[in-house]
Image: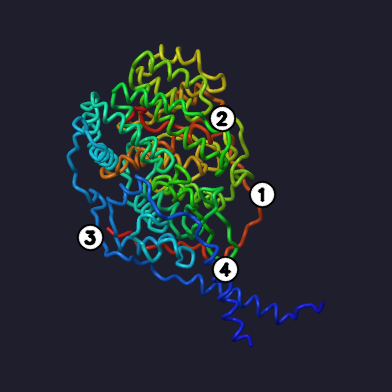
């Protein structure tokens, strides 16, 4: 009897999940996604590395381009394209960059390391979040990235810079958990509006100079405000490095999207803000 | 009602776990299209292409070709982009086509809209300035979809109107400056007000006079934006760090409080915290 019931129940559970999965339109890509895609094309070796480095599972990404990994309109290809930006797109200029690729990769990728316990990346159709970090007692913690980071009709953040920026933000919630810090009760942030923060999820900005952290040392803290980062701050500093100190091939649309996202966050998400302004305001 | 037998509950739990394990199996991703050659991760995959002639553009396709080229251009092509746009300042057709394309893209592709606003801001044509001013005056939404604590329709329009302000400030005209100062004083979005302050200062050489002018119109609780630090390309670390030092001394109130330890018990993890590492990314 059990042998008959098992496949039936299993099928029901799996089909329920398939039916409920994927409500995010995957019919277009933003200009910035198209321009970045044209710089790497369908690089099979990279996406076969990326799904392991980010612990992505076919059961989560089925119907989101897992079996159509070079269709730039779909979510999984957009995820690995953002990972390409993060992995290869920064100049790592010791004299100018806030942090280095080693920091940003450490924050985004799967393994338990100095930045977080192990994580896996999954998609979400939740239209009320850009992303989330979830603690799991058994197995890796979960970084979700949601529809507004993928569908250009839904939000301005559907570009590769903002998507990779969210890998930083959610990954840094993992840092907060690993080192046992409380960043507030509003989705892991201080409740707002408060101070100079004009939205409802607020952070502090822990100002630091360029060169204050060696590349690979962003995880370090001395437990005081003099050496510390918040999730939105890590996101802003990453976006600033994409906007101002990328590799020479970085398309203008990706740099411009990064600057726009960095500056709007710096203006409205910090209690003791504003954070740094990225780049000069010349139109081009 | 008879309580469920322990064995039945156990069986059900077993089924759920087994299904979970089945689902969690990972099969590698694959593509329906053949792979492209490996890109050069340091130099990029595409050769630099010369700019399409925007000054001579008389069709929508020609303007579109320029927008696509500019959007994909690299930092070393920035001067070429600016020169090509400046040369088209008398092309009224291009200015109108760019403005029409902005109206189309606004709802469907934010990143393309930013590029269009950037081009219009550099164009210095009568049609382009009017387009930017009209864009800045679009009604600001009061309600919308809340994502991560922000109303996304406000953020979407606010960031684009901030880009429009950059272009208006770059005109260096009394009419343009008046629009920028009005935005500093009255625009409902902090994103736009903050950018308007930065753009006005930068376009007036960050002078004391510009700061004095702004201080007359800026909202009282936003005066700190007048001394905000700007990180720009090519700026030395020493220069940035000196500015930061001055800023922190002038505004001791922005020093954040000490981080707060979480009041939680140590949560056990099941053997997944080791740094198992991943292979180095391909090159």
- Whether residue B75 is visible here, answered yes or no, is no
Per the image, the residue denoted by label 3 is B37
The reply to whether the C-beta atoms of the residues labelled 4 and 2 are less than 8 Å apart is: no
- The answer to whether dots 4 and 1 both sit on one chain is no
Q: CA distance from mark 4 to mark 1?
A: 38 Å
Tell me the number on the disc at residue B263.
1
Per the image, the residue denoted by label 2 is A196
Residue depicted at 42% across the width and 71% down the height: B27
In-image side of B103 versus A226 (left or right): left
Name the element at disc 1: loop
In-image side of A195 versus A55 (left or right): right
Per the image, the residue denoted by label 4 is A16
Mark 1 vs mark 2: give the one in front: 2
Letter of the chain that mark 2 sits on in the rendering: A
- The answer to whether dots 2 and 3 both sit on one chain is no
Residue A199: % across, % down? 57, 36
Mark 1 Cα shell of 10 Å, populated few (<14), some (14-19), many (≥20)? few
Name the element at disc 2: loop
Name the element at disc 3: loop
Mark 2 vs mark 3: give the one in front: 3
Residue A105: % across, % down? 40, 52
- The answer to whether dots 1 and 2 both sit on one chain is no
């Amino acid at each position: 009897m059990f042998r008959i019931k098992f496949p039936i129940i299993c099928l029901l559970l799996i089909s329920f999940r398939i039916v409920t999965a994927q409500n995010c339109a995957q019919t277009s890509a933003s200009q910035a996604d198209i321009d970045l895609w044209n710089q790497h094309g369908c690089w099979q070796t990279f996406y076969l590395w990326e799904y392991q480095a980010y612990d992505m599972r076919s059961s989560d990404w089925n119907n989101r381009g897992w079996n159509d990994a070079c269709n730039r309109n779909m979510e999984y290809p957009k995820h690995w394209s953002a990972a390409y930006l993060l992995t290869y797109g920064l100049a790592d200029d010791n004299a100018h960059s806030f942090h280095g690729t080693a920091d940003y990769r450490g924050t985004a990728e799967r393994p338990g390391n100095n930045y977080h316990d192990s994580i896996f990346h999954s998609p979400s159709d939740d239209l009320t979040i850009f992303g989330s970090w979830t603690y799991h007692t058994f197995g890796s913690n979960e970084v979700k990235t949601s529809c507004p980071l993928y569908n250009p009709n839904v939000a301005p953040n559907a570009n590769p810079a903002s998507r990779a920026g969210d890998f930083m933000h959610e990954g840094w919630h993992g840092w907060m958990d690993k080192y046992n810090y409380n960043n507030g009760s509003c989705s892991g942030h201080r409740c707002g509006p408060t101070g100079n923060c004009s939205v409802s999820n607020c952070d502090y900005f822990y100002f630091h100079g360029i060169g204050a952290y060696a590349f690979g040392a962003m995880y370090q803290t001395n437990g005081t405000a003099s050496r510390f980062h918040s999730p939105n701050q890590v996101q802003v500093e990453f976006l600033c490095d994409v906007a101002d100190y990328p590799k020479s091939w970085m398309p203008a649309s990706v740099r411009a999207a990064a600057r726009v996202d960095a500056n709007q966050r710096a203006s409205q998400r910090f209690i003791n803000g504003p954070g740094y302004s990225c780049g000069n305001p010349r139109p081009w | 009602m008879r309580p469920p037998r322990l064995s039945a509950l156990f069986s059900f739990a077993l089924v759920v776990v087994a299904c979970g394990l089945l689902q969690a199996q990972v099969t590698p991703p694959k593509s329906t299209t053949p792979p492209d050659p490996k890109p050069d991760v340091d130099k990029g995959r595409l050769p630099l292409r010369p700019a399409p002639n925007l000054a001579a553009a008389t069709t929508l396709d020609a303007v579109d070709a320029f927008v696509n080229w500019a959007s994909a251009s690299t930092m070393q092509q920035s001067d070429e982009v600016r020169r090509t746009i400046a040369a088209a300042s008398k092309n009224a057709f291009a200015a109108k086509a760019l403005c029409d394309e902005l109206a189309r893209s606004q709802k469907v592709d934010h990143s393309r809209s930013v590029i269009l606003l950037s081009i219009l801001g550099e164009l210095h044509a009568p049609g382009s300035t009017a387009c930017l001013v009209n864009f800045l005056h679009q009604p600001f939404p009061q309600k919308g979809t809340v994502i991560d604590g922000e109303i996304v329709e406000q953020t979407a329009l606010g960031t684009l109107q901030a880009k429009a302000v950059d272009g208006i400030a770059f005109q260096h005209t009394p009419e343009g400056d008046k629009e920028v100062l009005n935005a500093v004083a009255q625009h409902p979005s902090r994103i736009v007000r903050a950018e308007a302050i930065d753009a006005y200062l930068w376009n007036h050489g960050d002078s004391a006079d510009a700061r004095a002018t702004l201080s007359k119109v800026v909202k009282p609780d936003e005066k700190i934006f007048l001394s905000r630090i700007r990180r720009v390309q090519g700026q030395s670390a020493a220069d940035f760090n000196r500015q930061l030092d001055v800023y922190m001394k002038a505004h001791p109130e922005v020093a954040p409080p000490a981080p707060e330890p979480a009041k939680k018990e140590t949560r056990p993890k099941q053997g997944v915290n080791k740094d198992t590492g991943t292979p180095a990314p391909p090159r």
